Amino acid sequence: MPVDKFIKSRKIKYMNRLYQKLPFFMELVFNGLFILLYSLNQTKQMSFSLISQETFMQVLKIMSFGAPIFVLVSIISFYKRSHSLDDFFRKYIFSLIVFVPMLMTVGDIQFAFWLSAVHLFSSLLSLYDSQSVQQSDFIGQAINPIEKIKLAPAQIVILSFSAIIVIGTVLLSLPISAAEGKSISLIDAFFTATSATCVTGLSTLSLADNFSFIGQLIVLILLQIGGLGYMTLHSSMMILLGKSFKIKNKILMQDLLDISSVSDLISMIINIIRYTLIIELCGAVVLSIAFSFEGYEIGESIYYGFFHSISAFCNAGFSLFNNSLEGFATNPFISITISTLIILGGLGFIVLKELELVFMRKKKFVNLSVHSKVVISTSFVITALVGLYIFFTEYLHAFTGYSLFDQFQLAFFQSVTTRTAGFNTISLNALYPHTLYLICLIMFIGASPGSTGGGIKTTTFAILFQSVKATLRGKDKVEFFDRLVPNHIVVRAIAIIVISLILVSFFILLMMRIEPEHDFLALFFEVVSAFATVGLSLGITPYLTGVGKVVIILLMFVGRIGPLTLALAVGKTKSQDAQVEYPTGRLLIG
């Protein structure tokens, strides 16, 4: 009968689906348990009242031998469900990349833990492959109302960052994230998660003293996600895992990255993956060697190298040392490497792509786009002028006792990190007040569009400068390198600057009311640093009241997503079909 055939086909389809997911569930149970037990042991959360520590370590050793077996079962399952060998390599190459080192280091508990965790995470992502999993009618009906909610790209950016901050807050609030004998309050976890996701670097607690290895790792993951952006990172993982894009995601990413064609979008996302991995890896290698020469053990050196490389490239400013990088002020390998990572992270991926073409001699420097020329020239001029100012004003003050080379090195590093990174190699309280005020101005400008940094952006400042210059010369057009800037871009730049100035002024006034025990310069510096997601501070962050911390949290969030993005998300209205154009009116100004 037709009904019996239908029921039988449904059963077969259900069994096939269960068979396909069985390897994943096996990996989830076995390797998930292994990851959990190892994490509990590393954070001293494991009780040995029922089992001795020696027996427990033997169990972990046995499980480390079993971990690659379950990964292999998953790989075989992936191969069987693939249409061809080429399809298998395209979709599941990541599993092979993880399995090979697991096989080479079989029996090593630590390597098995890291590689098992990475592969389990990728397996979880593979569940969302729309080509292999079809939703039931019940699930589809439940999801349809959600999909009908049309969100603007600006609103999606805000929701994605908010979700990441909430998840990070929950994870950092867990006992497993705190160092032995320490506890992390909800407000401090919220502050740290926001600062990491917004790649700011301000912190109410010491990463080295108050957070466990797991807690520090969570912070590192949050700042990597925050630096690249959730949607960019999500799209990167989909490409890396061989997944297909939904049309809605393609349109969203084209809007966020300001790219017109889908082919250019895929190319840009691949370049983001490539640049991030290569630059952070190279920086980590150099820093690991540099830290080893400073007397740290090889394991510590590698960990410090990778952490600070990622933090520097993401312009986050988080450090595992309580005094940031002051202990390495005269180490050129560390300071120059960190400075280079900050600069590369602050230029933006579009500029990095064009610089790669110049480096490969496929393009001449004079043929760079107007955007790249403005970014590079503005960044160079700001860095050079600020560096020279800091050098000459602090030559006989904060830099006393250092050699001439070290003084140049200190001035250069501080001029680079001031724009949006948040590291420091000298105590900021030792600088003159007028130097600190200049630093505030440079922090407000920030990095470049499409980068991992914050601020109003270098191009926005450049447009304002050229606009003033054109006005003084009696011109009504803004020009860059013999190219005109469209009027709507000029208006947008001015809007960003005005909104930013209003926000910073309001929050300074608010902080002065909430934190009367702190002086004006310290509060002014803190507010600008939070808004520009820089992370530099005059030392008042840990001593803020609960309300003061919430205000800084809100300011970091606004600074990361951008004031204009927030305004567009809140004030989003339906576009009118018929555009009304009114007669021109004249106003007296100035």
Image (spheres, rainbow, N blue to C red):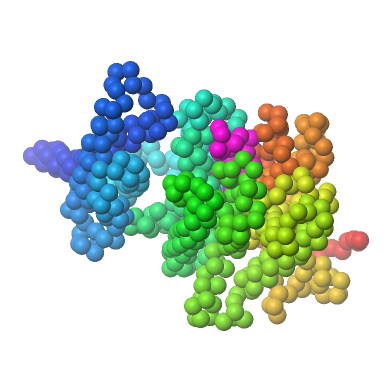
Residue 77 vs residue 183, the one in the foreground: 183
Q: Which quadrant holds the N terminus? A: top left
Query: Residue 103, how many percent across, how many down?
Result: 24, 50
Residue 464, quarter of the rendered image: bottom right
| 138 relative to 359, above or below | above
Query: Residue 34, how many percent across, how many down?
Result: 30, 35
What segment is highlighted magenta in the picture?
A: 190-210
In the drawing, does residue 505 fall left or right of residue 60?
A: right
Q: Which quadrant holds the C terminus? A: bottom right
Question: Which residue is depicted at the point 61% across and 60% down?
Answer: 332
Residue 559 vs residue 277, the one in the foreground: 277
Q: Is residue 300 visible?
A: yes
Question: Which residue is depicted at the point 82% across and 50% down?
Answer: 432
Residue 515, quarter of the rendered image: top right
How many marks the image carries: the answer is 0
Query: Residue 105, how many percent across, how many down?
Result: 27, 49
Question: Which residue is depicted at the point 59% across and 53% down?
Answer: 315
- Magenta-span inclusion, residue 203: yes
Question: Which residue is depicted at the point 72% across and 46% down?
Answer: 427
Which residue, as the protein is rendered here, is positioned at the far top?
Answer: 49
Q: Is residue 411 visible?
A: no
In the drawing, does residue 546 fall left or right of residue 432?
A: left
| 46 relative to 405, above or below | above
Residue 251 vs residue 555, the one in the foreground: 555
Query: Residue 570, how many percent across, how many down?
Result: 64, 45
- Magenta-span inclusion, residue 409: no
Which residue, as the protein is rendered here, is positioned at the far left?
Answer: 1
